[in-house]
Amino acid sequence: MPARVVATFSRLGLAAAGAALAVAALSGSSLAQSATAAAPVATAADTAMVAKGRDLFANYGCSSCHTLADAGATGHVGPSFDGDANLTHDFVVDRVSNGQGSMPAFGGQMSSEEIEAVATYVTSVAKKP
Ligand code: HEC
C-alpha cells in the first residue's frame, strides 16, 4: 500500500478515536442521553468550534455592526443575524471571506479555520426566522 494511503487511513483512525472520546466525554451516563442533549451541536469538536467562533465574533468587531443576542451584539450597520433567513454556513463563509457593499472582507485577516469557526458560531446561535 502506498505511504500516502496508509497515512490517510491512520489519520481517519485517529479522527474516529477522537469522535468516540468526544461522545464519551459529553455524558457520564448514557450515550443515548448525550445524543439528545447535545443536539444541535453534535460533538465536543463542534462545541469547541462554537466557543472559538464566539471569541472571534467579538475580537473582529462583528458586534459593532451586527445584532446577535448570543454575543450581546446590538450593531445596526449590517443586518441582524437573529431572524436572518439568509444564514447558511456557506453563505456566512462567503460574506465574511469576500465582503459585500459596506461589509468588509475578512479573507485577508482571518484564516480559513477562523472563518469556518465564526460561520459555525453564527449559524448555530442565531435565532431562527
Ligand atoms: C463595518 C461594519 C461591519 C463589520 C465590522 C462586519 N459587518 Fe457583516 N455586514 C455589514 C453590512 C453593511 C452588511 C450588508 C452588506 C450588503 O448586503 O450590502 C453585512 C453583511 C453580513 C452578512 C450577510 C447577512 C445577510 O443576511 O445578507 C454576514 C453573514 C456578515 N455580515 C457577517 C459578519 C461577520 C461574521 C463579521 C465579523 C467577522 C462582520 N460581518 C463584520 C457590516 C459589517
Image (cartoon, helix red, strand yellow):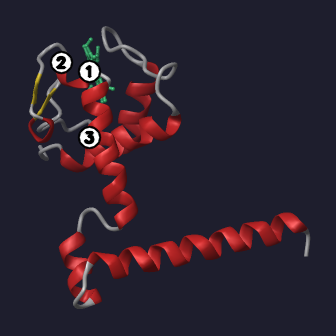
| Above or below 49: residue 112 | above
Ligand 1: does it lie within 8 Å of the C-beta at label 1? yes
Type of the residue with mark 1:
Gly
Q: Residues within 10 Å of mark 3 (few under 14, many from 20)?
A: many
Q: What whole-number distance in Å separates the C-alpha atoms at marks 3 and 2?
A: 14 Å
Residue visible at 37% across and 35% down in the picture: 91
Give the class, few, some or many, for how many residues have Cα within 10 Å of label 1's Cα (few <14, many ≥20).
few
Chain-order first, disc 3 or disc 2: 3
- The residue at label 2 has a CB less than 8 Å from ligand 1: yes
Quarter-of-image position of residue 102: top left
Q: Could you tell me the amino acid type at mark 2?
A: Ser
The residue tagged 3 is 54
Image quarter where the C terminus lies is top left
Read off the residue under disc 1: 61
Q: In the image, what residue type sits under mark 3?
A: Arg
Say which quadrant the N terminus sits in: bottom right
Between residue 58 and residue 75, name the one nearer to us.
Answer: 58
Q: Is 125 in front, or is 111?
A: 111
Real-space Cα distance between discs 1 and 3?
11 Å
Q: Estimate the x, y position of residue 31 in percent, counting from the top left.
A: 29, 87
Residue 92 versus residue 18 in the image, above or below? above
Label 3 near label 1: C-beta < 8 Å?
A: no
Q: Which mark is residue 64?
A: 2
Q: Is residue 21 left or right of residue 79?
A: right
The image shows residue 85 at horizontal and vertical percentages of: 20, 38
Q: Quadrant of ligand 1?
A: top left
